Amino acid sequence: MKTKMLPTRRLRPLWALAILCTAAAAASWLRWPESRAQTPAPMTLKPAPAQPSPLAALPATAGEAIAHTCAACHGTRGQLGDEAFMPLAGMPRTQFVRTMQDFRSGARPSTLMGHVADGFTDADLQALGTYFESLPMQEAAR
């Protein structure tokens, strides 16, 4: 005849293992050397040295390099094949900078250009304005 094991008998090996692990952990903690038991001094973080913007070191062609971000909508070199977006080639620098600052401040509402203008510093806007002003204005389509 088969005898049925009571639930407590099935759990005895697990209880024995748990007690053994607890005892081993307690024994190792009691033998822990005092030098290791001390908490280390808190780490102090030093601020990173201030570095100039990488765009500040660029030569006068910086505006041309930055202008590649405008090409998807406003065309390569600020000139378009259609009239969906305003061409930037030949736009006066002061007008370009003022328009971008207006986008950035929200004075000129736009779904996209406010976010784009946020990504540029005033120096970047000046470089872009100088670059677009130097380009020939696009001829009107006939």
Image: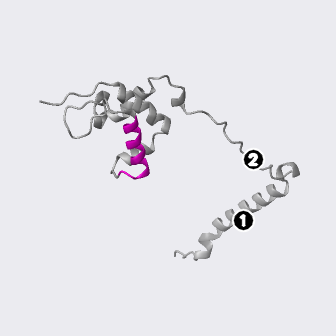
Residue beneath disc 2: 43
Left or right for 49, reference 109:
right
Q: Which residue is most to the left?
A: 142
**Toward the viewer: 86 or 65?**
86
Q: Above or below — where is 138 with respect to 3? A: above
Main secondary structure found in the magenta portion = helix
Left or right for 35, reference 127:
right
Between discs 1 and 2, the one toward the N terminus? 1
Element carrying mark 2: loop
**Toward the viewer: 42 or 21?**
42
Residue at 72% x, 65% y is 19
Element carrying mark 1: helix
User: Looking at the picture, how far across and down is residue 23, in whole percent?
Assistant: 77, 62
Left or right for 20, reference 67:
right
User: Looking at the picture, how far across and down is residue 20, in whole percent?
Assistant: 73, 61
Q: Say whether residue 73 is magenta.
A: no
Q: Above or below — where is 46 with respect to 128? A: below
Res 92 quadrant in image: top left
* Mark 2 nearby-residue class (10 Å; few <14, some 14–19, many ≥20): few
Residue at 15% x, 30% y is 141
Q: Label 1 to label 2, Cα distance in Å?
A: 38 Å
User: Looking at the picture, how far across and down is residue 128, in whole percent?
Assistant: 41, 32
Is disc 1 in contact with disc 2, using a CB cutoff of under 8 Å?
Answer: no
> Bounds of the magenta span?
94-108
Front of the two marks 1 and 2: 2
Residue beneath disc 1: 19
